[in-house]
Amino acid sequence: MVQSDLKKFFTYSFFLGILILPLVGFATTTFDAPRAFTVWGVFVAILAFGLIIKVIRHSGGYKNLSDSLAPIHKQIKDKLTAVPAKYYILALLAFAVIYPMATNRYLVDVGITCLIYIVLGLGLNIVVGLAGLLDLGYIAFYAVGAYSYSLLNLNFGIPFWFCIPIGIAFGCIAGCIIGYPTLKMRGDYLAIVTMGFGEIIRLMLNNWDKLTAGPNGLYGMAKPALVYPSITDGGLTWVTFHLKSLEALYFLALAIAVLTVVGVRRLDRSRIGRAWVAIREDEVAAELSGVPTMWLKLLAYALGASFASVVGGFFAAKLSYTNPNFFIFMESCIVLCIVVLGGVGSTPGVIVAAVILSAVPEIFRELQNYRMLAFGAAMAAMMVLRPEGLIPATRRKRELHAAEQHQHEES
Amino acid sequence: MAELLLKNITMKFGGLLAVDNLDLEVPSGKILSLIGPNGAGKTTVFNLITGVYKPTEGTITYNGKTLNGLHSNKVVSRGIARTFQNIRLFNSMTVLENVQVGLHCRTKSGAIRALLNTPFLVREEKEIEDKAMAVLEFLGLESFRNDYASNLDYGNQRRLEIARALATKPGTLLLDEPAAGMNPKETADLMDLILKIRDTGLDIFLVEHDMRLVMGISDMITVLDYGQKIAEGTPKEIQNNETVIEAYLGSGGKK
C-alpha cells in the first residue's frame, strides 16, 4: 500500500516537473532555475503532505485518534442534522441581507457577480443536471437577455420590468431554436452543437453593427426603477426611485436569485422534474412510460434559457453597458464548472460552487498569471477527490457510487 | 371485439425482413402469448406496436383508431403500456418515483403551474402519490417505496417495471419476457400476478420463452418464425402442432 503510494508520489512529481519547470523557468532565452524549482517545490510539497497523511492513516496512530474522536464527530453531526433545514436557509438569507451593509463596495460588487452566477448555475442545472443535456453554449441565453433589455430600452424606452417578460420570451424562443434541431442528439454531438450555437450568437452580436453596435457595445441603458404611489398634499402621485446604488442593485439580484432557487426547487419536485430525471436516466424507457420526451427536452432548454435571460437583463441594467466580449465561450465553461463542481442536479451544491468560483479568482489574484493554473488545478483535484460534487444531489450520488461498486465487484 | 389489431404488418431493416405480412389480434380481456425461436421477430412486433419502429407496410389499430406514425408516448396515453426484455428502470430514482413517472401521461399540470405552486398542482401531486401507492400495493411493493430502484432484487425489479407500466392506466399490457432470469418460485409468483392483472380487465400480450409460464396462463398462442406467423391456437393445439415442433427442434424432430 505505502509502496504504491510512494510510486504515485514520484510519478506525479515527475510529471509536474516536466510541466512546470520549462513553463515557469524559461523566459525567452534564459532559464530561471531558482524560480522554476521554487514553484515545482511547492507542488511537490503539497504532494508530499498528502503522502504523509496517507502513511499516518495507514499506521495505527491515526486509527486510535479517529476512534477516540468518532463519538464526538457523530455527536456534532447529529446536532447539525437535528436542526431543520429551514433554519439554515433563514441564516443564509439573513447573512445575504446583512452582507452589503457590513462590507465595502468592492465586496458588494463581488456579491452581485456571485448572485448572477448562482442564477446562471441553477438555470443550466435544469438543462444539464435534471434533463441530462450537455450544453456548452449556455451563455448565449445570458447574452440574449442582456441585448434584449439594452435594445428595447435604448430604442423604445421600455422600462426594466416590462423588458423582463419580453426577455424571457426571447430567451424561450432562443432556447427552442437551439433545442429543436438537437432533440435527437446525445452527449458529445449535443455538446459540440450547443458550443457552436453559443459562438454564433456572440459573433452575430459582434458583427451586426447596425443593430448591436458591434464590439463597441451598447451603453446608456436606464437602471431598474421602483415606482410606488405616495400621497402628498392630498393628491396621489407616483414616485420613481431608480436603483442606482450598488446596494439596491445587490438586493434586486438577491431577489432574482431567491426566486430562481424557489422556482427550480418547485420544478424539481413536480411531475415535470421527475420526467426530466427519467429522461436523463433512460430516454427510451421514459418515452415508453408515456413521457413526451421531445417536448420536455425543449421545455428544459426554454426554461433554462429564461432564467439566464432574466439575469442577463439585470446584468446589462446594472452596468448600463454591454458588449459581445462578456459572452465568450469561457463564461459558458465557468457556468458548467459551477454545475459540475457543486454536484450535478443539486441546488445547494450549485449555490456553494457559485460562491466559491466567484470568490476563488479574487483570492487567487495574488498569484497573477498562475491564477488560471491554480483554478484549473483546483478543479482537477476536485474531480479526482469528489466526482459527485461538493454537495451531491442524492440521486446523482447513488448513480456514481453504484458504478464504483460495480467496478469493485468486477475487479 | 379485438382491441389491438395488426393488419398485414411488414417490417424491413434494409434487406432483412424482420416481420413478414403479419396479422394479429389481441383479444379483449384475454392473455395472448407470442412465442418463437430467438430472432423470430417477437420484440420487433412490440416495438412496432409501441411506435419505436414505423412499419414498412400495414396498419395497427387500437379500439378502431390507427396507431401508425404516433410517437411512443402517444401510444402509451392511448392505453398500451409495455415492459422491457432487459430491465430498464430509472435506477437513481426511488421505487415510488419510478411509478410516479408512469402517471405522467395521465396528469397535466405544466411548468407554469409548478413554478407558481398552484393549488391545482398541489392537489394533483397528492393524487399522483396516492395513485402510485395504490399501484405499489397492488403489486406488493409498498414497503420498498423509498428504496432506490437499483437496490431491489431481480424479481422485484421486474415487478416494478410492471408497476410503472400499470401506472399509465393501460387497457393493454405488453410484457416482454417478464420471466427471463427468474427462478421457479419467482416465475410461479409472476404467473399469479399476470392472472391477477388480467382479472382487473386488461388484455395481456406476452412474449416469453418460459414454456411452463406460456402454457400455464395463455388463452391463445401465436407462433412466429422468421417473421412469419406459422401457427396460432390454444396452448393444447400449439403443443401438438407439427410445424411448431419443427421450428423449435429442426426437421430432425419429426421422426
Image (tube, rainbow, N blue to C red):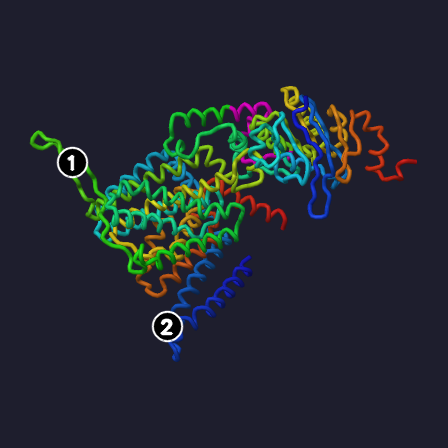
- Disc 2 designates what residue? A35
Identified at 69% across, 34% down, the residue is: B177
**Quarter of the image where one finds residue B183:** top right
Segment tinted magenta in the rendering: B131-154
Read off the chain for label 1: A
Residues at discs 2 and 1 both on one chain = yes
Q: Nearer the viewer, residue B136 or B162?
A: B162
The quadrant of the picture occupied by the C terminus of chain B is: top right
Indicate whether residue B139 is drawn in magenta.
yes
Give the answer, above or below, for where A397 lies relative to A385.
above
Q: Secondary structure at mark 1?
A: strand
**Quarter of the image where one finds residue A225:** top left
Query: What residue type is disc 1 on?
Result: Trp
**Quarter of the image where one finds residue B84:** top right
Place of residue A177 in the rendered image (x, y in percent of width and height, measured from the top left): 44, 47
- Disc 1 designates what residue? A238
Place of residue A41 in the rendered image (x, y in percent of width and height, measured from the top left): 41, 68
Identified at 65% across, 21% down, the residue is: B196
Q: For residue A122, say whether it is visible.
A: no
Left or right placement of residue B130 versus residue A141 in this view: right
Place of residue A196 in the rendered image (x, y in percent of width and height, measured from the top left): 45, 55
Indicate whether residue A283 is drawn in magenta.
no
Left or right placement of residue A313 versus residue B158 in this view: left
Query: What residue type is disc 2 on?
Result: Arg
Q: Secondary structure at mark 2?
A: helix
Q: For residue A220, say whether it is visible.
A: yes
Place of residue A381 in the rendered image (x, y in percent of width and height, measured from the top left): 45, 56
Give the answer, above or below, for where A105 lies relative to B191.
below
Q: Nearer the viewer, mark 2 or mark 1?
A: 1
